Image (cartoon, rainbow, N blue to C red):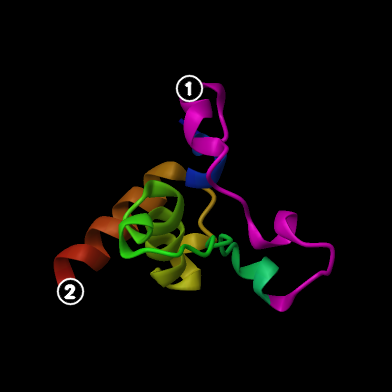
Amino acid sequence: MSGTPIDYVNSTDVQYLSADIQLVSEHGRRHLRSSSYRTLAVPSTRTTLGDGSFAVAGPRVWNSLPATIRQITSYGQFRQRLKTRLFRA
């Protein structure tokens, strides 16, 4: 598999997930500095139950990763660096 993890989610294999995930750069009309860090837009919720949904929890976890990991374009490298980070924590 090639491309970034976000590209994978947007692929045809998992289309049902791509509706819940948007890059900040695609979310608004303005160009923000955060768009260059590949951050995801986190929707607001009214309940704590909504905070646990994939549409909210997924982008929060993704945005909590360091920018160096989020900007990796190779899936293999992303997976390796993510595993390293998780096992060091």
Residue 21 appears in the figure: yes
Q: Residue at x 63, y 55 (%)?
A: 23
Residue 6 in magenta stretch: no
Q: Badge 1: how crowded within 10 Å, few (<14), some, or many (20+)?
A: few
Q: Which mark sits nearer the N-terminus, 1 or 2?
A: 1
- x, y percentage for residue 27? 71, 57
Residue 4 appears in the figure: no
State the SS at label 2: loop
Residue 13 in magenta stretch: yes
Image check: 41 left or right of 54?
Answer: right
Q: Work out how far the residue at label 1 is from the one at label 2, CA to CA, in angstroms.
A: 31 Å
Tell me the quarter of the picture where residue 19 sits. Answer: top right
Q: Residue at x 83, y 69 (%)?
A: 30
Numbered range of the magenta stretch: 10-33
- x, y percentage for residue 14? 47, 27
Label 2, on which residue?
89
Tell me the quarter of the picture where residue 1 sits. Answer: top left
Q: Residue at x 48, y 22 (%)?
A: 13
Q: Is residue 51 above or below residue 16?
A: below
Split into 4 quadrants, where in the image is the C terminus? bottom left
Label 1, on which residue?
13
- x, y percentage for residue 49? 31, 57
